[in-house]
Image (cartoon, rainbow, N blue to C red):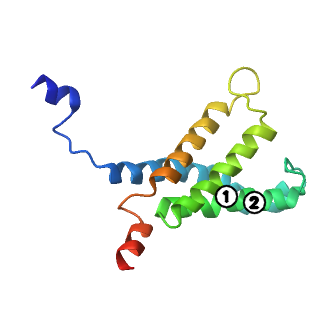
Amino acid sequence: MLKKLLLLQSIPADQDMGLLLLRIAAMVPLFLKHGIEKVFTFSAMAAHFPDPLHIGAVPSLVAAMISDSICTLLIVFGLATRWAAAIVFVNVFVAWAFVHHFLLFGPGSDHGELIVLYLAITLTLFLAGPGRYSVDAVVERRM
């Protein structure tokens, strides 16, 4: 009885449901906060967007917009999930490295822990895939 209680064996383990929840819970806020912002305020942001890779502010903004809008939605629906997760991971890592300078604690690090969470989640989705409840799984079953 105690073992069942401690291990929560009365609740069936469903990794696929966990991956679905992870995709939705992490990527919807990223899309709502950063993706929509970049799409609808593109011209205003282009004038002052950081250029960490020295490719120009507009190309940097386009790359970030694709990552934060298109790729996050792809992850939510589970379509091309591993590719989309890799793109989001790279975009977030570049922002953390070159814009936030790997700040995690202290003054000016107000986004540090959230960035690390996004990196961990996108790396997890890249390695694990989207799970059974995804467009990728439907496409795989039909092929």
The residue at the point 17 percent across, 28 percent down is 5
85 or 67, nearer to the observer: 85
The x and y percentages for residue 31 are: 60, 55
Seen in the image, is 121 located left or right of residue 62? Answer: left
73 or 83, nearer to the observer: 83
Residue under circle 2? Answer: 63
The x and y percentages for residue 72 are: 58, 58
Query: Vertical placement of 24 versus 119: above or below?
Result: below
Picture quarter containing residue 43?
A: bottom right
Q: Quadrant of the C terminus?
A: bottom left
Residue 9 in view (yes/no): yes
The x and y percentages for residue 88 are: 64, 53
Q: Which residue lies furthest to the left in this view?
A: 1
The x and y percentages for residue 14 are: 28, 49
Q: In which quarter of the image is the N terminus?
A: top left
The residue at the point 64 percent across, 60 percent down is 69
Q: Which residue lies furthest to the top in this view?
A: 106
Residue under circle 1? Answer: 67
Seen in the image, is 65 located left or right of residue 57? Answer: left
Kind of residue indicated by mark 2:
Ala
The residue at the point 63 percent across, 49 percent down is 89
- Asked if the residues shown at circle 2 and circle 1 are in contact, with their CB atoms under 8 angstroms apart, the answer is yes
The 10 Å Cα crowd at callout 1, few under 14, some 14 to 19, many 20 or more, is many
Query: Vertical placement of 92 versus 3: above or below?
Result: below
